[in-house]
């Protein structure tokens, strides 16, 4: 059974940093592109960042560009999201996901596997 498990969430003050991890198990996700989404209370789930299976290409939402960095370690079957200069608007549940292709990488429908989510709260 393929499984994605996020960790590293928590409470941080504005301007601070957090690093989220997403550990994959049950199968190798090496051929998959990986992405991060987030969902704030009362809002729809939105794309945050994605990375190709090789790690050679990345893509970010405008709202996090320059502040967040996505990376992956295929040997460890783990994807990371380094979040710097956090603002209260970044408060959300963050989900990692795996996609077989890159064509719909910013769309929820483009992903085949999802984690359960990790809460990130940024206080002002």
Image: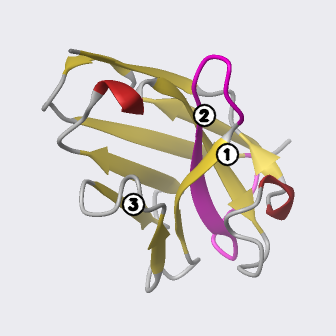
- Decide whether residue 40 is among the magenta residues: yes
Quarter in which the C terminus is drawn: top left
Q: Residues within 10 Å of mark 2 (few under 14, many from 20)?
A: some
- Asked if the stretch drawn in magenta spans residue 47, the answer is no
Q: CB of mark 2 within 8 Å of CB of mark 1?
A: yes
Name the magenta segment's main secondary structure: loop
Q: Position of residue 76 (x, y in %)?
A: 46, 57
The residue that mark 3 highlights is 70
Residue at (59, 58) in percent of width and height: 35
**Residue at the image point whose x is 52% and y is 43% from the top:** 22
Q: How many tags in the picture? A: 3
Report the residue marked by disc 1. 25
Image coordinates for residue 70, horizontal then vertical, percent: 39, 60
Mark 2: secondary structure:
strand
Position of residue 18 measured from the top left corner of the image (x, y, whole percent): 26, 34
Along the line of sight, the residue nearer the viewer: 109 or 34: 109
What's the colour scheme? secondary structure
Describe the element under mark 3 as helix, strand or loop: strand
Residue carrying label 2? 5
Circles 2 and 3: CB atoms closer than 8 Å: no
Q: Is residue 47 left or right of residue 114?
A: left
């Amino acid at each position: 059974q393929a499984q994605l498990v996020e960790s590293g969430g928590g409470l941080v003050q504005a301007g601070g940093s957090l690093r989220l991890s997403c550990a994959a198990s049950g199968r190798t996700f090496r051929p998959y592109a990986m992405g991060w989404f987030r969902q704030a209370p009362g809002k729809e789930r939105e794309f945050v960042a994605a990375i190709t299976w090789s790690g050679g290409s990345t893509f970010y939402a405008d709202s996090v560009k320059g502040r967040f960095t996505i990376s992956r370690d295929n040997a460890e079957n783990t994807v990371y999201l380094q979040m710097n200069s956090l603002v209260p608007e970044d408060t959300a549940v963050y989900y990692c996901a795996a996609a077989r292709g890159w064509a719909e990488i910013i769309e929820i429908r483009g992903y085949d596997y999802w984690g359960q989510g990790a809460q990130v709260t940024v206080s002002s």
